[in-house]
Image (cartoon, helix red, strand yellow):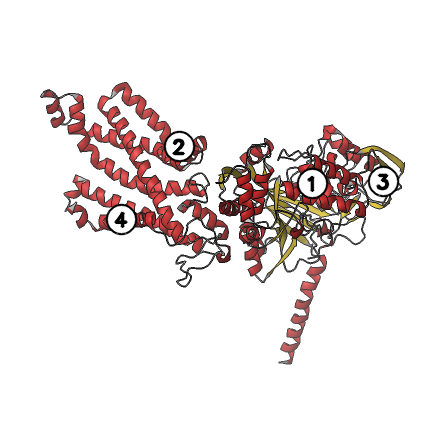
Amino acid sequence: MKKMFVIGLAILMVASMVPAAFAAGEEKVLTIGVDQEAVGLDPHIVTSFSSHRRVDLLYNKLVRHDENLKIVPDLAESWEIPDNQTYIFNLRKGVKFHDGTEMTAKDVEFSLNRVLDPKTASPGRSYISTIKSIEVLGTYKVKVVLSAPLASFLEGLASNNCAIVSKAAVEKYGNLQKVAVGTGAFMLKEWIPDNSMTLVKNPEYFEKGLPYLDKIIFRVIPEQASLLAGIKAGTLDMAQINDASTVLLAKRDTSIAVMQKPGINVRTFGFNTTRKPFDDVRVRQALSLAIDRNEIVTVAEFGMAQPTGPIPAGATQWALPLNKLPNFTPDYAKAKALLAEAGFPNGFTFKIVTANSFEGGLSVAQVVQNQLKKIGVNAELEVVEWGMYIDRWVKRDFDSMVELRGGSGEPDRFLYRTIHSTGGVNNFLFKDADVDRLLDKGRVLTSYAERKPVYDELQIVLAQKAPIIFLYCPFETHVMTKQVKGFKQVGYGSLYYLIQTQK
Amino acid sequence: MSRLLKNPIALVGLIIILLYVLITAVSQFWLPFDPLQMDVAHIMEPPSFKTGHLFGTDEFGRDILTRIMKGAGVSLLIAISATLIGATIGTFMGVWAGFLGGAWDHWIMRLADVLFSFPSLLLAIFVMAILGEKTYNVIIAISIVYIPQFARVSRGAVLAIKNNEFVRAAFSSGADRRFVLSRHLLPNIMMPVIVQSSLSLSVAILLESALSFLGLGVQPPNPSWGNMLSGARKVMLLAPWTALYPGLAIMGLVLGFNLLGDGLRDILDPRLRNIK
């Protein structure tokens, strides 16, 4: 009996050691499900959301956003702004690219010049196009001079499209779409297109002790419901989920964690302001007065969104409360009176272009259609396939369109390109002297105190002229297993904080 | 007709179809709720007597029973008109090909073979993509799918009887082609065409639902069983009734047409009739 007890004890002791021994050598692998394959990896060239999420981990910028969308140091340890057109960046010392070479001021100069070169066709070019000269002042010091003050300059540099790449690597490979030579916390190990991408820890990452994970595997799973199923089954650790009903299902499951935060992307219902009757401001105002944002959020997003004005509501230091914006509170009598004044006492018929996807906002269009009936306006839905949707968007071939726009916490970044008469994505073909004047003024002022009144006025003018009806900002939702700890959301889907994530 | 009543399978099919026709007729005058009116306060409510939403509400708070009733009319209209058009044109072509033979036969049937070589849903999607998403275009698309099927059936039937004695007798007693066609051939090939029509109606219901499900058929917010299922797909796990009832509606009507078709074949096929 005693002998058996001793043997039993011995077995127990050995058994208890086994997991500990395994744990010490075990690789910490995080598998993340994504609904789209990356289109390429070159940080200066990529536009797709899916590519940006990989760049988040592979590259660094001079400055970056923290979880409150504030600008914080990244590769630039500190910076000085001697006058509002000159920026001097002091770089971190001893930062290594994935190929082992050191990152210096030469790479910064090369990267910014590459973004500025029209031949690169970088989306980042418009963010920093006011750069006049870039001067290397030492191995770790760069001076950038602007041709005019640009309030959103640091915001621009915080974009992935202005990431710092290795000069030597670009000269060797031509472009970086298929390879990754960055300074990021993770390095590209294997990429099987349309299936998976494996990133491994960068042992020489400049923040000591980080990252905690040894490996991140991206798995492409196009269906939102399958992403959730993967997390439930434990084959995935984490995923970003956009579809509200899937999020609702995830929330019902107590065994998984759901992180949510109002994002900065903006759902808009915009008009082609050169088409009749939308060239008449009274018609646009009437439609704006018929829209009930809270109802749209309840129905189309199951309440998981925040109604917003022209500046994403999450950017609290800029955004005006909605009750301060004209035409934002439903008023059907006034809307009908405006329509009658514009010559449509019995309403009119027009078309809304939409697609049956999260971005295409079919359910939003259906609620809008229903709301407009209250003022006698008949909206017909044109539900088109995604490729056709993009095509119509590019050609500006629509009466009106429901969209999901990539926003920004910085008003100049978001509104200049969206609504300035020369803006790159002003698909509304909207031209207005007041709006242009305010946008031009806001971008050359640098202090918050000076800019705030300008953007306050701009928000009111935009609400009055209503070329776009700003609806809401969908929540950014990450769903993960309970073992995943330490992740933080930024507000535009960034996976940067995976470097601080543990599993 | 009395034979139809004596055949239990056909009778059940007929009753099911009449039930749907009745629902459609009622829906023209009365509906429990407004099929298009959204009700934000009652999104995805489960079926209940208390609220009056017997089949529950969908993701926009619309009454599902109302939308199914409204959708029944759309489905029946599309299925019946598409089958009628397809059967008329197809039978005409098939009879022509079979009766005249030669080059006519060759070219008409090769054209039918070309259409036949596409899977029917693919062909319907192709036609819809060209014509655009309108309800009457769904009718045209399904008719085009049906034309070769009816052409084959009727051609075969014509070939089988055109050398029979009674046809020859008609010709030799001086009847012209038109007379023989209308008096002797058409009545004799109606049986397979009717059976084919009944089975085609059920496939048409499925085709219409599939097209609407894919966003190519009836456009939202107008209800059709297919686009109701498409909307329900996203919330199916949260509110199963949004998918269950439109699905059952499709199943019921398809079953009705299939049972009727099977029953009719048993009744009309002389070979089967004599087995008893």
Q: Which three-letter amino acid code belongs to the residue tagged 3? A: Asn
For disc 1, the marked residue is A415
User: The disc numbered 1 marks a residue on which chain?
Assistant: A
The label number, if any, that marks residue B118 in the structure image: 2
N-terminal-most mark, 4 or 2: 4
What is the chain letter for disc 3? A
Q: Chain of mark 2?
A: B
Same chain for labels 4 and 1? Say yes or no.
Answer: no
| Label 1 SS | helix
Label annotation for residue A20:
none
Q: Would residue A273 be seen by someone viewing this image from the given angle? A: yes
Chain of the residue where label 4 is placed in the rendered structure? B
Callout 2 touching callout 3 (CB < 8 Å): no
Rendered location of residue A246, percent (x, y) = 55, 53
Q: What number is the disc on residue A84?
A: 3
Place of residue A147 in the rendered image (x, y in percent of width and height, measured from the top left): 83, 33
